[in-house]
Image: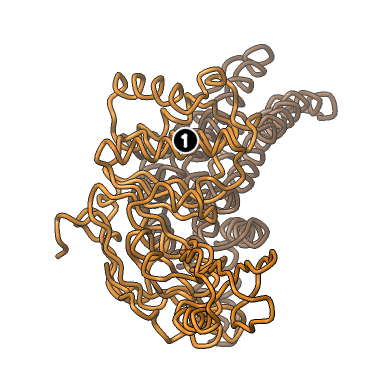
Chain colours: A brown, B orange
Amino acid sequence: MNRVLAIALNTHREAIRDRVLYSLLFFGCIVLVASLVTREITIGDEDKMVRGTAMGAISAFSSVMAMFLGVSLVWKELERRTIYTLASKPIPRWMFVLGKYFGLMMTLGVSLLIMAALYVLILGLGQGLPVVSFYFFLGMLFLELMLLTAWATLFSTYSGPTTATAFTLAVFVIGHLADDIWTFGQQAEGLAMRKVSAALYWLLPNFELFNIQPEATHELAVALPRLALAAGYGLSYTAAVLCVAVVVFSGRDFK
Amino acid sequence: MTAPSLAIETRSLQKIYYSGFWRRPFTGLDGLDLQVPRGEIFGFIGPNGAGKTTAIKCLVGLQSPTAGEAFLLGRSAQEAEARRHLGYLPERPYFYQHLTAVEFLDFYGQLFDLPREVRRARIGSLLERVGLSGAAGTPLRQYSKGMLQRAGVAQALINEPDLVILDEPMSGLDPLGRMLIRDLILELGAQGRTVFFSSHILSDVQSICHRVGLIVGGRLRAVGAVGDLLTAQVAHMDCTVRVPIDTVLEGDPIATCGEERILRIAPERLDGLLDAVRAARGTIVQVQPNRRSLEDLLVEEISRAGTDPQQPMEGQGARP
């Protein structure tokens, strides 16, 4: 595992020395702070509006970072040919894929923590410290990022960043519309349509399972079984996608 | 299984690439049989596109062969663990630009599970050996091409490998850089390590290798000690003779000074020329056989492969 950790730390170090990450993080923090403005343009429930906007910003910018960094995760190694010296070391391909993946998750985790700390600061100064549901929100968001990054990594193992971005974005959007796809599909008259929608629903991820932002915004309690189900689903689905990524990457030649 | 005395062995190694919509095949390697014993400095030469880099990539695990087998130090080259005692420098190396030389070497040391203390000691000595001690803390993005090549050599040696594979290690280096690499290869050879390297700089190959392999069109055309390959094949004879001015002799005149002429002639036509000189009551001053250079051999093999790529080289088996 030391070798996986070494690759992960190198990936993390590369990301944190990249100006793009700082730009995204900077804009994320700006939007977080700007959420205070919503207080001025809201009549009643101003605190709730600030919480909702700020959590939305954390969620959106984290997802953008996961997609943006994830789609070029493996591709960059191939494009810059750094893979030549790496893959010629006693490193099985699975170690490489996992190392890259964990390195990016490390970076996303740190970014998430920075934005969460800013959120706590903003709320602490205005309306008191956030309740426990906010921390559950962060946990669920991280699970969603894990799954989204796994998909981005999978696409990155066999395609360039443009194609990988398109595919990852499609998975992200469909994943957030999974319940709607099921509902509308089952209402369709044609059998084929019903089958296609069912297939999409079961094959593609359901990111809405991780969405507890409404509860966190309204400072409501979240049922632990729901969190446990989402965690189990997220971790096993992520593991499965990473396994596919390893299989795809293992068959690749480096020309 | 492969013989434990071999550092590298390939058996009928074949690599076919498919390109385009119709997946048209292109043969990169065509049944490469090669054996490199441990402790040998082996030069791998051939024109661009001959299959040198493809063969090396199959050996170091960057590509899977379409058919055949490759072994490194007795283990299948497809196993990651076969690379534990391997050092590899790719052609035109690219490295992590965000790292300093120390971080870069430390990272690669970790990939071999080397303890921190061992890494620290080796990094210092390696940077000194390749002349980068003064730039140890500089990010690689600020390195010149020659410095990057040196850093690449250092990473290839971080695990003190038994087998070092270098793909065009002297490419793009100034004379000093070339000398450094040449000395390093000789030093590794003196330490009993196996060095396998490809190069276009034939004079270097000729001067430092125990044996060379010549690959053209994905096939090994010749392999052997440089001396054996070239001694066996005299390119031409330069004959200095003294004959009456009006004597007609075969051969290409190189210089004429009064009755003395220097003629260049193919070895098989030498007897005829000498008989003609004697018949004309002339004097044979000097007969000088000129060995082919590695370059002559390479050019000849390329043209031979161009006319009949299936024809193996005469007088030299493909196996050592």
Using the image as rendered, state which of residue A32 and residue B126 is in the foreground.
B126
In this orientation, does residue A180 appear?
Answer: yes
Q: Is residue A4 left or right of residue A41?
A: left
Q: Secondary structure at mark 1?
A: helix
Using the image as rendered, state which of residue A218 and residue A242 is in the foreground.
A242
Q: In the figure, A234 relative to B235: above or below?
A: above
Using the image as rendered, state which of residue A88 and residue B91 is in the foreground.
B91
Give the labeled residue for mark 1. Answer: A139
Pinpoint residue B15: horizontal percent, then vertical percent: 42, 74
Q: Give the chain of mark 1.
A: A
Pinpoint residue B318: horizontal percent, then vertical percent: 32, 74
Picture residue at 25% right of the left edge, 50% below the top = B81
Using the image as rendered, state which of residue B189 and residue B110 is in the foreground.
B189
Picture residue at 51% right of the left edge, 34% below the top = B150
Screen quadrant of the C terminus of chain B: bottom left
Determine the residue located farthest toward the right in the rendered image.
Answer: A41
Q: Is residue B311 left or right of residue B170?
A: left
Picture residue at 75% right of the left edge, 26% below the top = A30
In this orientation, does residue A90 appear?
Answer: no
